Image (tube, rainbow, N blue to C red):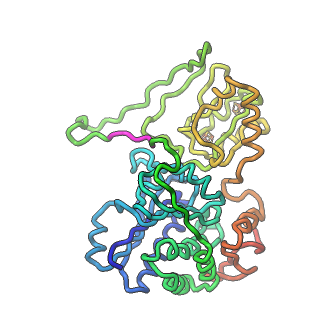
Amino acid sequence: MARTISVEVIYRGIFQKTLAKNICRGIVLAARKEGKIGIAFGRYGDSPERNGIPAKNFAIVAPNEEELQLSMAQYEPEQTDVTINVDDMMCKGVESWAWYGLQPINQKIREQGTLIVTSMLPAEELIKFCHTKTHPYRLAVLQAIPSFSGLWVYKDDHTDVRILGALPKVCPELVSLDSVLAAIKEEWKDDLKAKSARRSFEQVTARTVRPGEGNPEVPYKFDLPGWKTMREGVTIDGIRLGEPIKFGDEIGGYRPARNPYFKKFSTRTMRPVIDFDKCIKCTLCWLQCPDSCFDVMPDGTYDLNAEACCGCGVCEAVCPVDDCVTMVNEAAFGDNKSQWEMFKTDKAGYKAWVDAKIAHRPERSHGFRYLGQYQEQVAKMGPAAGTPEKGSAGPGGRKQMGAGAEGGEE
Ligand code: SF4
Ligand code: SF4
C-alpha cells in the first residue's frame, strides 16, 4: 500500500451514530491486521447532532505514521476513495450548518472511487437523486433498510459487518477480506457476523456512474463573509415578517419569512402529502408543526413548504381527518414544488397525484410501528442480509434478530 486511503461514512445524526462508529472502527482494526496504521474519528454535523441531521465519520488508513499525520492535519479529507451512505435518501444531498449549503452525497469521491449506499432501491433509481459529477465514479448498492443498528433498543441487523465485507471488494487496496473477517471475529466474537460479511463480499457489485449522469441541478449554496467583510460586533438578523400570498388573481393568507440559510429538507426521509379536498381548515397542522413549515393559503387551507420540512410526521399525527395528511417516503419525489399550486392548477390531476403517491408509496416509517415489522423488513433484504439463526445470542447474551427470528420491537 503506497498511499493513504480515506473513507467517509455519512449517517443520520444520533440514530446512526453507533452504526457509523462501528464501521469506521472495523476498518481500522482490519487494516491493523495487515500492519497498516489508521484512525477512525467522528466529526459533528450539527451542534449537538440533532435527530436526523446528516453527519460524518471517517476512517483513514495510511502506509506509515507520517502519512497519517499529514492527513490528520486536515479538517476532513479533500477526496475519498469510498463514501458510505447509510440512508439512501441522503443521495439527494446533505445539509448541515457546518457545510454551508447542500453538499452532494458524492462530492468528495475521487475519480473511480466508490459510493456504497444501503438501500432497497435499484442503482438506477438512486443515481437519479445523486448530483452529477464531471468524472466517473462507481455506485455499489447493498440491499438494506436504513438501519438504526446499535441505537439503544434497535436490534442488530448486521449492517455494520455487511458494509465491512463489501469494502475489500470495492476497494481492495484498503483491506483484504481475510483481515476484515479476522477483525470481526476479534471485535464482535461472532462467527455469524463474519458469515454476513463474507456473503456481502461475494454478492456486492458496483456499476460505473458516467460523467454527467444523475441529477443535473446545482445544489444551493451561499457565500460566507470573509473577515474583512464581516460587520462589526456580533449581530444576527432577525427573521422578517411574512406577507400575503399571491397566486393568479387570488391574494391572501400568510407566508412567514424563513431562514434562507437553513432549509432542513435533507434531514427528511418522508414528507407529508396533503389532500386539500379533505382539509377542514382546523389549523392543527399549522399550529403544531415544530418548524413552521405550513403557509396559510388564500383559500384557508395549509400548504407545505417542502424546503423547510424536516419530515417529523407531527402534522400527520395531529390532523383529525382520515388520509388528509399522509407521510410518504421521500423516494417518491423529485422536487420541492408547492402541492397547493398543483391542486389549484389541476384539481383532477392533483387528486390522481395524491392517490398515486399514497397507494404506491415505497415503504418507510419512523421506526417500527407494529410487532414483527422488523423481521418483515430484514427478510426483504434477501440472502445478502445477515440472517442470524433463530434465537442465536450475540455479545453479552444479546439476542440477534433477523429473518424468522422471534420477538418484537420494544
Ligand atoms: S412533517 Fe409536518 S410537522 Fe413535521 S416538519 Fe414537516 S410539515 Fe412540519
Ligand atoms: S390538520 Fe388536517 S384538516 Fe386541519 S388544517 Fe391541517 S390539513 Fe387541514
* Residue 49 visible (yes or no): no
Q: Main secondary structure of the magenta part?
A: loop
Quick one: 148 or 361, which is closer to the camera? Answer: 361
Left or right of 250, for residue 262: left
In the rendered view of the protein, which quadrant contains the C terminus? bottom right
Residue 371, position as x, y percentages in the image = 78, 63
Residue that appears at 59% across and 82% down: 194
Foreground residue among 272 and 119: 119
Residue 197 in which image quadrant: bottom right
Classify residue 205 by image quadrant.
Answer: bottom right
Q: Return the residue found at the far top.
A: 249
The image position of residue 278, as x and y in percent, is 77, 30
**Closer to us: 289 or 194:** 194
Name the residue at the left extreme: 228
At x 55%, y 73%, the residue is 166
Tell me the magenta residue range. Answer: 219-223
Q: Is residue 248 magenta?
A: no
- Whole-percent x, y for residue 27 in the image: 46, 76
Ligand 1 sits in quadrant: top right
Horizontal relation, residue 24 to residue 385: left or right? left
Q: Is residue 407 visible in this depiction of the protein?
A: yes
Residue occupying image coordinates x 55% and y 49%: 129
- Is 138 in front, or is 163? 138
**Which quadrant would the N terminus be assigned to in this image?**
bottom left
Q: Residue 199 lies in what quarter of the image?
A: bottom right
On screen, residue 259 versus residue 143, left or right, reads left
Residue name at image x 48 percent, y 84 percent: 179
Where does the image place residue 307, in percent across and percent down from the top left? 53, 38
